Amino acid sequence: MGNFPTAVKHCLSYEQLIKDYPWLRRWLQEEKTKYPEFVKIVEVGPRDGLQNEKEVVPTKVKIQLIDMLSGTGLSVIEATSFVSSKWVPQMSDHSDVLRGIQRAPHVQYPVLTPNMQGFQDAVAAGATEVAVFGSASETFSRKNINCSIDDSMLKFEEVIKAAKEQQIPVRGYVSCALGCPYEGRIEPAKVAEVASKLYGIGCYEISLADTIGVGTPGSMLQMLQRVTQEVPISALAVHCHDTYGQALANILTALQVGVSVVDSAVAGLGGCPYAEGSSGNVSTEDVVYMLHGMGIETGVNLDKVMEAGDFICSALNRKTNSKVSLARNRKL
Amino acid sequence: MAAVVRLLNRGILSSAMGQHYLALSTVAKVKATGLKAGHALPEKVKIVEVGPRDGLQNEKSIVPTEAKIHLIDMLSESGLQVIEATSFVSPKWVPQMADQVEVMKGIQRKPGVTYPVLTPNLKGFQAAVKAGASEVAIFGAASELFSKKNINCSVDESLQRFDEVMRAAKEAAVPVRGYVSCVAGCPYEGKVAPEKVAHVAKRLYAMGCYEISLGDTIGVGTPGSMVDMLEAVTREVPVSALAVHCHDTYGQALANILVALQMGISVVDSSVAGLGGCPYAQGASGNVATEDVVYMLHGLGIQTGVDLTKLMDAGAFICRTLSRKSSSKVAQATCKL
């Protein structure tokens, strides 16, 4: 080893280390935040968006919207929901929509399946990916799907078992991840518990949803720090609502923590059922604008998304919720 | 020790090995990677409320003087420390600000609150001081074309014109705030070089402005361009003398403000109810809403001294007066439950 004291001094010297490995200084001092190079956008407009719009949209319009979105570069488009039509009339044409769309290669079209019945109908209609919806709030779970969190997990386990047999991947949602309209504050530990349960029973990805948009970068960070103790970050997504204008800042925080999957809705479709007249989903256009501005790739063509947004807003006879779209002065 | 030397000689330091190695060094200060989001944020942020000036200036309806005064008085009660009251610009250019003197004289000045006013030239400065102004603001553009189109001279010429305002302000012991517009992009030039922004900010600071507000005039900035710009500016001007003035035209304002805070900025301009559209994008929004900024800051545990409820009351008042909906999402979100 040669001169022992010198070698020791050499090894223990930070300055020497930096001299030998100059790139290390940058790494250590984290001069610039490391963001994911690529972010996958999960487009929920046709399902989460339309589900929360008052006007019932004709089937062919839904199909055209999805087809337009398929041409934008998006790789995941949530197409519809196999929920009972008496609960969600907007989604009653689920089978027709799924059968009617032109599936683009390399694009996934997941559908919501709250139970076995829904799952079977979805598969019969050609679904190749499904999603289940859990909640971090006991009260929200009971009010929304009429059963406790634990009971809902049992239902999802059934669906996931059947899905596994057919090699159909399942995505899990955790609603009320940053707050509940009934319970108020939700403990990060509870979110972690539900997320980890869903991951444990076989969901490949868990989308953490700020259902009422009350989250801020502060609560987002706290929640993610806790959840990432139980679920690998590569399996996490954020689903931010923009009801309090915090969505992009919350998404930015999630990216800084290492999340690289973001849910959003074209034109910011879908209001908030808990805050009359307020907005809901964050707009895909605004998210893509931010990501591209940060040098993060998405594979998405912003102009084409805006065209799809114009189309659906025209059909719904409403203004877009996307600020990017408004600023670019798209004519409806 | 031999093991450590072997690690070094391998020439490849994986994250785990690197951490292990550095644990041996007492000199290295290692921050854990990955949690930039938990980066030290300021404990306090000063909000500069620009609604009564920048906000109303960009609203189409002319607001009666008493309503302007009442708005400022309500804002004074909300805990805001700085409220930009009016602009001593010629009424023929900006009719909304024609009642500048009445407004200045009519407001009830709360102790501890400052009421800066815009002064585009010496004449405006003199009129401002006569009307009781105790702080003024001047502005320069980071874009040559914007400067030419807006005030018909180059950026350097515009800064020279402010020399006389600076001299007069110094003599009168009136602090001056500097604004730089188009810091993230220009409606005419497009992209604006960060070095140009730094140049103008440095000039304003050297001339004697105690604070420089960096304005994303058309709201095109993103956390990407914001960081690049702030890196360039903070090389020339101390971060404690900087503020950000983000427009929400592309919905990016809060994200941009967040990265600015992460870079050490602790002064944020905003406008109650998000008053003030964008003159360069018809129908689009302009200033970021103070309510939304305060909501985010409080959620981060950052103190602002602002009472959000009282602020929203002021916002509701001015929106009723203007017969328009609030641009603040926080104000719009009234949870039924």
Image (spheres, grey):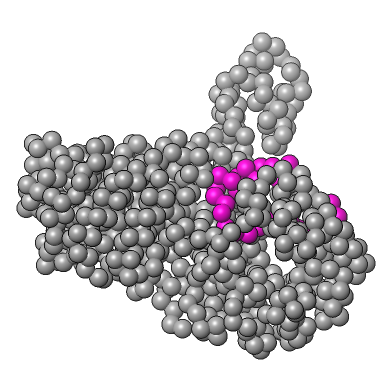
Whole-percent x, y for residue A17 in the image: 60, 26
Residue pictured at 82% horizontal, 81% vertical: A125
On screen, residue B102 versus residue B309, left or right, reads left
Instruction: Name the spot of residue A317 as percent of width and height, x first.
Output: 51, 83
Query: How many numbered badges does the structure rendering display?
Result: 0
Q: Is residue A144 shown left or right of residue B158?
A: right
Q: Quadrant of residue B167?
A: top left
Q: Residue sitting at 41 percent across and 37 percent down?
A: B44
Q: Residue at 66% across / 42% down in the picture?
A: A225
* Quarter of the C terminus of chain B within the rendering: bottom right
Residue B253 is one of the magenta-drawn residues = no
Q: Is A227 contained in the magenta span?
A: yes
Q: Is residue B198 visible?
A: no
Instruction: Decide if residue B167 is on the left or right side of residue B230.
Output: left
Query: Which portion, as a residue range, is magenta?
Result: A200-229
Instruction: Specify the quadrant that holds the N terminus of chain B.
Output: top right
Kindly indicate the quadrant of the structure image that contains residue B86. bottom left
The spot of residue A167 in percent (x, y) is: 88, 67
Residue in front for this viewpoint, A226 or A142 = A142
Residue A126 in view (yes/no): yes
Q: Quadrant of residue A274?
A: bottom right
Vertical comparison of B220 with B75: above or below: below
Relative to A185, residue A10 above or below: above
Residue A272 x/y as whole percent: 58, 66
Above or below, A324 against B84 in this view is below
Residue drawn at x 40%, y 41% is: B304
Outermost residue on the front side: it is B337
Nearest the viewer among A202 and B19 is: A202
Tell which residue pokes out farthest to the right in this image.
A165
